[in-house]
Amino acid sequence: MTSSAQPGDATAAAPARAKLVLGSLILVAAVANLNLSVANVALPDIGASFNSSQTTLNLIAVGYSLGLAASVLWLGALGDRYGRKLMIVLGMGLSIPASIVAGFAPSDTVLFVARVVGGISAGLAYPTTLALITALWSGPGRTKSIALWSALGGGIAALGPLVSGALLEFFDWGSVFLVTLPLAVIALLMAIRFVPAHVNESTKPVDNLGGILSAIVVGALVLSINFLPVPNEQALALGLLAVALAATIAFLLRERRAKNPLYDLHVAARKTFWVAACAGIIVFGSLMGAAFINQQYLQNVLGYSTLQAGAAILPAVFFMVLVAPRSAKLVGSHGSRHTLLSGQFLILLSFAGMLLLWHEDIPYWQVALPLCFLGAGVGLAGTPSSNSLTGSVPVTRVGMASGTADLQRDLGGALMTSIFGALLAAGYASAMGQAIDESGKNITESTQSQLQLSFASAENLAAKNPKYADQITAAAQQSFLDGDRWAYLAAIAAVLIGMALVFRFFPKKDEEERLRAAFHAEDTR
């Protein structure tokens, strides 16, 4: 181990210049978080510009999460071994060209690839932020720092649509991918100046084979979900699913046999770890999946401008930032289990509200009410899920905990966005096909394919055929509503599964504290 009695020593309650250090880490996380959500508001414009299919738009939306989720465990382990500060510097440096390529992408394929590379850059930097908070702070200070990191990170991510909406009022869709450039430069300079190096880092070798297998698992799984509803692509989807399954088995076998595993399955089997990880995947995935669907609903169905659609999500941001710092106190007084269940229940109410209240021509309060529940629920559940992970591992493996905490957000976002998007695409195509059949009109096969491709494709067709524009738009709006209802039903099912896991397996407050003490004693022997 390479640490010494420095400001970052694990025995200290907080590092020197704690506010500047924490501010630097939160700004690094902000760059990653903002990039997660900036694309959502621009999706209708991107679809119109490239005449993209709904599946391609899904991939563009999920590309950043995909790159981050696929790389985060491996890169977190590399940070533990070779330097967490180095990972931040490399990540912020790579994010700059990735954003520029995305902003000036000549095709939707190039845009998707640039989004994946941007996600990898976040995989270098983002897991390090939580790992360093865990290594530099201890006791109540750590919980408060994680709460601030969670609240501000989530709040900034949720502000992405507002920032994007404002830019799209004056510039084209490429501008939304350039907005993080000045933040990335400032974060890079602050990290170089204020973040301490070599704090509680490991000297053990990194399991690179495990890292490669983990990337294959995530990448193949996410892509397979996106291609499943695409006509004539089921064979590819099933092939990718088979690759994901085989890589998962190989990963588990590798981690059981490796001398220094990338992912310690013994630690991962601890109830305070694996239950919190599963719950977090659903919680943060719900936030990101909802943002993906909601922005398209607000623009496509309600006719909001990009600025109005971005501003519409502010209730979620407000309640998330308001509730998250208070969740740390709730964890201290009632335990993680109670706090997690409370947050999950609010998220459940949110999706139920979207399913029941969100139709055509609704007043804004019906939009805002479910978003209030969503923000409050994520704000409540975010801190206990992340804090439970970091409190369940030895300090020399905080990269594993922070990687898993990041994986909650990123794999959750990638999976939920992919599932929501796949159901939206399938539901939209099915409803549009039914509408075409019921119209009784003699429509060519190519026209039908274009109508069923995506809402943006239908709008392009409506613009070329003004005589039928109202009919096409009305059918596309209703088909979109049918598709997003499929997504909200899936979200409700996922949240109920998450609540059942926490209720059944996560320990109550006294047992949680006893287990943490036992884990600490075991890890320090």
Image (cartoon, rainbow, N blue to C red):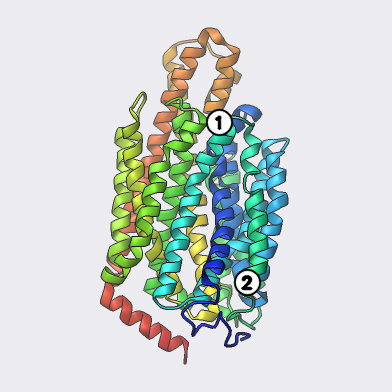
Q: Secondary structure at mark 1?
A: helix
Q: Secondary structure at mark 2?
A: helix
Tag 1: amino acid: Pro
Residue at the image point whose x is 61% and y is 40% from the top: 176
| Residue 209 in sight in this render | no
Residue at the image point whose x is 47% and y is 33% from the top: 309
Which residue occupies the foreground of this view, 251 or 321? 321
Which residue occupies the foreground of this view, 487 or 65? 65
- Extreme residue in the bottom direction: 525
Q: Is residue 358 left or right of residue 436?
A: left
Task: State how far apart marks 2 and 1 are (Cα).
Answer: 38 Å
Q: What's the mark number on residue 44?
A: 1
- Extreme residue in the top direction: 467
Mark 2 or 1: in front is 2
- Residue 336 x, y percent position in the rendering: 32, 68
Which residue occupies the foreground of this view, 373 or 238? 373
- Residue 188 x, y percent position in the rendering: 67, 61
Q: Residues within 10 Å of mark 1 (few under 14, many from 20)?
A: many
| Residue 279 in sight in this render | yes
348 shown above or below 479: below
Q: Earlier in the sequence, mark 2 or mark 1?
A: 1
- Residue 153 x, y percent position in the rendering: 49, 56
Q: Quadrant of residue 278?
A: bottom left
Q: Residues within 10 Å of mark 2 (few under 14, many from 20)?
A: many
307 shown above or below 451: below
Q: What's the mark number on residue 231?
A: none
Which residue occupies the foreground of this view, 104 or 25? 25
- Residue 356 x, y percent position in the rendering: 29, 35
Q: Is residue 52 left or right of residue 337?
A: right
Residue at the image point whose x is 51% and y is 80% from the top: 395
Which residue position holds label 2?
Answer: 84
